[in-house]
Amino acid sequence: MDTLRGLLARERRDDRLALREDGTGREYDSHRLLTNAWKVSNLLHQCGVRAGHTVGLVGRTPEAVLAFLATASLGAVVRFDPSDESDLRAVVAPTNETGRFDLPPGSTPVAYGAEPDDPGTRYFERDVWSQNPTLAPAAVAPDDPVLATADGSFTHADLLDGAARAVERTDMDAGTTVAVRAPLALAGTVAAGLVAPLMADAIVVFPDADTVADVAVATDSAPESTVCDPTSLLDDLP
């Protein structure tokens, strides 16, 4: 696997648990997660997202994970928790937050949660459901940028290398629960908390107050016995 698009390969779909949101009880097995990510890639493609475009993602939710995977598969760039940047080709956010973005003409807000009143806003739940369950076509290279943060731009290879480090440092393997406690605006959190579990067949967990997972991706103290600090994970990458 040399790009994040490889995480969405058809043969990786099965019935193992891949994602948990403890605050709501929502769960995705690998089959459902990947199939829905394919559908989101088609929705974003319809919104005009192409290689090199930037997509803003708001929230620590399954919708954000699906949109991250879909954006990466298109060769576009993700920015988690953006401010009101006007260079976004699309933004995927809770319905009550889409209005704060000053998007340029041709860009598209995609709302999840409550159905939006604005007819110019795509509705995630409805519009994803109606898409074909196939991955949108795109050519993606390892050195293509995939994540923009306050610390700079990171490529597919960067995130995969960081994810491999996280797997090694935490002994992450199939079935390991990984609590994502650090901000997704940190590249190390994305590598260790999203990419690494998916790569290792572990389980991404968005925790609530009672969650105690096997591994935490955290910058502060955590109840988990094993903690991966995302702030140093991508240091000294080639």
Image (tube, rainbow, N blue to C red):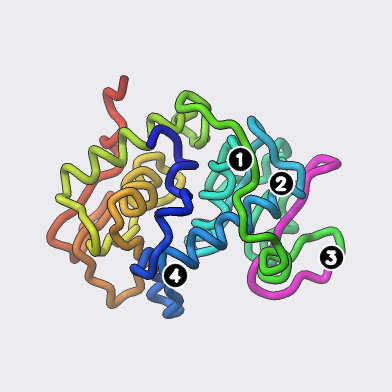
Q: Secondary structure at mark 4?
A: strand
Residue found at the very far front of the displayed protein:
11
CB contact under 8 Å: marks 1 and 3? no
Quadrant the C terminus occupies: top left
- Residue at 30% x, 24% y: name it: 237
Q: CA distance from mark 4 to mark 3?
A: 29 Å
* Residue under label 3: 118
Q: Eyeballing the image, is 3 above or below 24?
A: above
Q: Secondary structure at mark 3?
A: loop
CB contact under 8 Å: marks 1 and 2? yes
Q: Eyeballing the image, is 189 above or below 66?
A: above
* Residue under label 2: 45
- Residue at 74% x, 54% y: name it: 109
Magenta stretch in the rendered image: 103-118
Residue 65 image offset from top left, x and y in percent: 49, 56
Q: Amino acid at mark 2?
A: His
Q: Earlier in the sequence, mark 1 or mark 3?
A: 1
Q: Amino acid at mark 1?
A: Leu
